[in-house]
Amino acid sequence: MFTMCQPLRSKANLVMLFKGYRRFVRTTCRVSIPGGSLGNELKAPPRFLRDKKIVPDADPPHKEDIHKLYQLFEQSKRLTILTGAGISTECGIPDYRSPNGAYSSGFKPITHQEFTRSSRSRRRYWARSYAGWRRFAAAQPGPAHTALASLERAGRIDCIITQNVDRLHHRAGSDPLELHGTVYTVMCLDCGFSFPRDLFQDQLKALNPKWAEALESIDHGEPGSEKTFGMKQRPDGDIEIDEKFWEEGFNIPVCEKCQGVLKPDVIFFGDNIPKERATQAMEAAKQSDAFLVLGSSLMTMSAFRLVRAAHEAGAMTAIVNIGVTRADDIVPLKISARVGEILPRVLDVGPLGVPAV
Ligand SMILES: [Zn+2]
């Protein structure tokens, strides 16, 4: 009796799991259509479906602020820019700390320690990241990225440092120092071998055909639409996904050189920036005659330290960010505005050597 029931039960579980998955996908897909309703099967929207704006509210930039920022670009001979998540929220990639950011809904990003110590945490991270990758990779640079690339070409910017891992500066034509690394590279924790994320996505797809099939079969929605997959995306490419789907049956590739553990080449919370990279950023900050922060609350010490060093070295310092920052007390010019709104307006003020489009 037992030997006969056991395989049957296992089979039933497998079928149910997969059916549940399909149903889940269909349900969430339905609400991604504008004007669609949740239907009767759910009593209340789950947390990941709460309708939240990605970009925090801000008034249009003041004329006075636009002129002050213009003067900073005009007067500086050696300008260093530090960009944070605020510059990417305008492209549909949510941040952590703004009023509408991921933290506001109770999200906790994975720490380096969790990732390295727990295979369960790694499975959870990669499952969500895999599911969200297509949308994350489809995000396009916004007006702020484009304006900065133009200013860089015109010789108005000496160095761009970014805390973002999304490569949107690159797509706009800049080549910033990526303080926290990038999710576009995957590296082995054991031997250091690194390779492109696209290749890793292919490996994940091959190892998880049912996931791939489910993801392929749904409409991915527009980049920037918060309801893609009916799940919520995070700044590091991570995405919220129902626990039962990643806990069972999600397989992670290992390093092809040494069978070691693979990790995105990003600095998770609790990890340190490689010394050489930190030094390079610090040198840029100290040698600048102006240091401008765009879209960062500077809550991570590695970013705050740079502004403080520039300030102490006598550089002009300024911040454009919605909401408080850690450096509000030491920086003389603080502007509350959307970076993507104010930078194009700065370019309109006068000749900064940027050719008109
Ligand atoms: Zn390896």
Image (cartoon, rainbow, N blue to C red):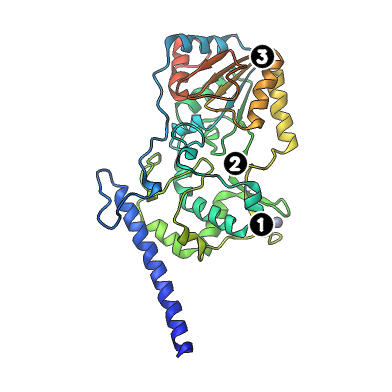
The first of marks 2 and 3 along the sequence is 2
Can you give x and y, in whole percent of width and height, for residue 85 in the image? 52, 33
Label 3 belongs to which residue? 315
Label 1 belongs to which residue? 261
Q: Quadrant of residue 163?
A: top right
Left or right: 206 as drawn, with respect to 192: left
Image marks 1 and 3: residues in contact by CB distance under 8 Å:
no
Q: In which quarter of the image is residue 315?
A: top right
- Check disc 3 and report its element: helix, strand or loop: loop
The first of marks 1 and 2 along the sequence is 2
Observer-nearest of 13 and 185: 13
Give, as a three-letter code, the residue at label 3.
Ala
Ligand 1 image position (quadrant): bottom right
Can you give x and y, in whole percent of width and height, for residue 353 in the image? 53, 13
Q: Is residue 154 positioned above or below 296 on the image?
A: above
Name the mark on residue 182: 2
- Check disc 2 and report its element: helix, strand or loop: strand
Which residue is drawn at the image coordinates 60% and 60% (left, top)?
253
Give, as a three-letter code, the residue at label 1.
Val
Which residue is drawn at the image coordinates 62% and 43% (left, top)?
268
Observer-nearest of 23 and 183: 23
Residue sitting at the far bottom = 1
Left or right: 175 as drawn, with respect to 131: right
The first of marks 1 and 3 along the sequence is 1
Q: Nearer the viewer, mark 1 or mark 2?
A: 1
